[in-house]
Image (cartoon, rainbow, N blue to C red):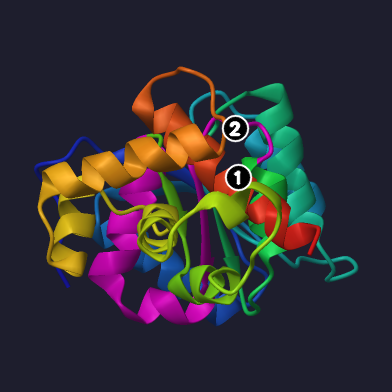
Amino acid sequence: MTTTPDRAPLRAVLAEDQALLRVGLERILGAGAIEVVEAVADAPSLTRALARDDIDIAVVDVRLPPTHTTEGLEAATAARAQRPGFPVLVLSQWVEPLYARDLLASGEGAIGYLLKDRVADVDAFLAAVRQVADGGTVLDPEVVAALLTTRTGPLDRLTEREREVLGLMAEGRSNNAIAARLVVTEKAVGKHTANIFAKLDLPQAPDDNRRVLAVLAWLEAAATK
């Protein structure tokens, strides 16, 4: 596992009801220079912890006591309503695009949705936490794969290549990383990205915001399929 002592430490709230996983996540985050200032096991404790003004990110299980439904997600969404753009990385055992859609609804980014299995790749997990804390958007590749078959509304306007680019964008990849994955030039990816923004009728805005809006449009289409 690679640590990141050269990066400024982040302060995080962690919510996970399984004790062993909670302790493991706390150690992983700590080794990655991410200080867990509170590690909680239920929704009321998470709501209280999210009210702190000295935290940089929350890493949250979707399902928490008392009912084990969507308490973690609801607490995270409420926190973002109070603090627009507050970074949240949600962990889940299931592929559920609606979770990502609900989190992304503000259109402000700083959102991650990963399956718990991804924690096993420690370096990738820590990179995802950092990317979300920096304002990026990271969706689990399995969620993206589930969405790739969706063809609804404005998404019908996209070519197959543009849909590939949008899928990789949803995973949080940069233009450079997308170019490497598709074995094309970064200039070509930039052209595809511009086409995606235009075809989805996205307003002029900083590219980071438009990337989030493009992913949100995709999720909205999947939810109404």
Residue occupying the point 42% across, 65% down: 160
Q: Is residue 209 above or below residue 156?
A: above
Where residue 129 appears, x then y in whole percent? 38, 52
Residue type, mark 1 in image: Leu
Secondary structure of the residue carrying numbered label 2:
loop
Image quarter in which the C terminus is found: bottom right
- Residue 216 is labelled as 1
163 left or right, relative to 78: left
Name the disc covering residue 107, or none. 2
Residue bounds of the magenta highlight: 105-134
Q: Is 58 left, or right, of 6 in this rendering?
A: right
x, y (%) of residue 150?
63, 68
Tell me if residue 124 comes above or below residue 120 in the rendering.
above
Give the percent coordinates (x, y) of residue 49: 65, 40
Evaluate whether residue 72 shows in this view: yes
Disc 1 to disc 2, C-alpha distance: 7 Å
Which is nearer the eye, 168 or 19?
Answer: 168
- Image point (44%, 60%), residue name: 163
